[in-house]
């Protein structure tokens, strides 16, 4: 009896083993990928938030970083060496063109000028007397010509001395705002020593570089928007005034100069600004909410909804707008995409709009 039972058990085991071998690919523990999907119970549709792709015109823009410069700017330095005699400006003061800012001691030159003016007065008197005598023929013409030459030399000497004296007066070459003062009364300064700076900041020049790929669209009067970390809630608007004549052979970028109004004097020369340059308008752009965009090492992607199921779509993005992203490739104009709950969605999973219990979402030309 025991032998018969053992034989029966062995027979059952052999039959089970044969059946297992025959149907091994359908068993979940054998690792068959196709049957893992089939054996697992089909999950309920995942509740997600969905949005329809929007089609609209967008402004094509280029982002860059730039440096602010005064409309005019200079470091004031003397042409001659001398002791500072008087200082006629305050730090940060607005001055007009031609204003005397500083005077150097010109005592020696003033004496030379007095001597030159005395020589000039004497030469003028001798020349006038010779002209009167020439009419009565009491002096030869040659003497009159000689005195005329001496008069011209005396006049030139006076002009030259006055020109040299002008170098001892430091004047504002244009209207602008002065910077910090670097000298004091009594300082001996040399040519090239910086006295202060002068900047005309009523408008600001903004220099920045853009890729050569947008060179065809660059032209004067294109709108520019700039922001600064110093004023996070402010936008400074201006326009392009000129485009550089050369492309950098290393960076393949070209320099663009824009001008920004600065009536409030908020922008200072040397400031770092983030620039947004509008180079054109694109019609019929495909726009999706930025929440729908996911990133991977292979690039950006979204989950589109086709026939009620999530479908992973690789996309190429373009312009980033406020709350939206332009999609250049990968989505059609009437696609439906997952914008909320993407963390529980994978390719092929049924989905439905959050709050809808009866049926999954059916869509998808995109």
Image (cartoon, helix red, strand yellow):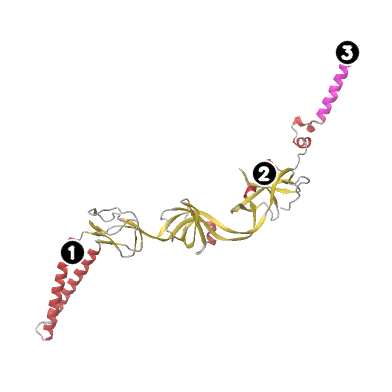
Q: Which residue is mark 1?
A: 110
Q: Secondary structure at mark 2?
A: helix
Q: Earlier in the sequence, mark 2 or mark 1?
A: 1
Q: Nearer the viewer, mark 3 or mark 1?
A: 1
Q: Which residues are magenta?
A: 1-21
Q: Position of residue 188 (x, y in %)?
A: 23, 53
Mark 1 neighbour class, 10 Å CA radius: few under 14, some 14 to 19, many 20 or more: some
Q: Nearer the viewer, residue 252 or 55?
A: 55
Q: Nearer the viewer, mark 3 or mark 2?
A: 2
| Residue 318 left/right relative to 143 | right
Q: Earlier in the sequence, mark 3 or mark 1?
A: 3
State the CA–CA distance, disc 2 to disc 1.
86 Å
Mark 3 neighbour class, 10 Å CA radius: few under 14, some 14 to 19, many 20 or more: few
Q: Secondary structure at mark 1?
A: helix
Q: Which residue is mark 2?
A: 342
State the CA–CA distance, disc 3 to disc 1.
141 Å
Residue occupying the point 14% across, 74% down: 123
Q: Is residue 352 above or below residue 149?
A: above
Q: Position of residue 282 (x, y in %)?
A: 61, 60
Residue occupying the point 81% across, 28% down: 20
Q: Position of residue 55 (x, y in %)?
A: 66, 57
| Residue 213 left/right relative to 181 | right
State the CA–CA distance, disc 3 to disc 2.
62 Å
Q: Nearer the viewer, residue 221 or 174?
A: 174
Q: Position of residue 172 (x, y in %)?
A: 32, 62
| Residue 213 left/right relative to 50 | left
Q: Which residue is mark 3?
A: 2
């Amino acid at each position: 009896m025991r032998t018969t039972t053992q034989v029966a058990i062995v027979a059952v085991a052999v039959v089970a083993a044969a059946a297992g071998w025959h149907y091994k690919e359908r068993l979940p523990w054998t690792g068959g990928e196709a049957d893992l999907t089939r054996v697992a119970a089909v999950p309920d549709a995942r509740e997600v938030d969905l949005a329809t792709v929007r089609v609209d015109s967008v402004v094509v823009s280029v982002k860059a970083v730039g440096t602010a410069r005064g409309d005019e700017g200079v470091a004031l330095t003397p042409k001659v060496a001398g002791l500072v005699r008087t200082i006629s400006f305050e730090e940060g003061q607005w001055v007009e063109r031609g204003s005397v800012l500083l005077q150097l001691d010109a005592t020696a030159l003033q004496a030379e000028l007095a001597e030159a003016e005395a020589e000039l007065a004497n030469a003028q008197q001798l020349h006038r007397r010779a002209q009167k005598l020439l009419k009565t023929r009491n002096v030869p013409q040659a003497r009159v010509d000689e005195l005329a030459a001496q008069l011209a030399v005396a006049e030139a000497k006076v002009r030259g001395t006055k020109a040299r004296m002008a170098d001892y007066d430091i004047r504002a070459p244009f209207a602008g705002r002065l910077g910090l003062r670097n000298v004091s009364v009594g300082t001996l300064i040399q040519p090239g020593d910086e006295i202060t700076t002068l900047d005309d900041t009523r408008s600001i020049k903004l220099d920045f570089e853009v890729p050569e790929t947008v060179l065809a669209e660059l032209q004067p009067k294109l709108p520019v928007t700039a922001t600064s970390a110093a004023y996070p809630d402010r936008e400074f608007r201006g326009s392009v005034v000129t485009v550089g004549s050369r492309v950098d052979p290393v960076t393949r970028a070209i320099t663009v100069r824009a001008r920004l109004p600065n009536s409030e004097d908020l922008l200072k020369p040397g400031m770092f600004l983030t620039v947004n340059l509008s180079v054109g308008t694109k019609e019929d752009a495909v726009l999706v909410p930025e929440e729908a965009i996911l990133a991977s090492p292979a690039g950006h992607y979204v989950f589109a909804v086709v026939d009620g199921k999530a479908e992973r779509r690789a996309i190429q993005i373009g312009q980033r707008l406020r709350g939206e992203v332009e999609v250049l490739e990968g989505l059609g104009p009437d696609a439906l995409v997952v914008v909320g709950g993407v963390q529980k969605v994978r390719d092929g999973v049924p989905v439905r709009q959050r709050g809808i219990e009866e049926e999954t979402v059916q869509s998808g030309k995109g």
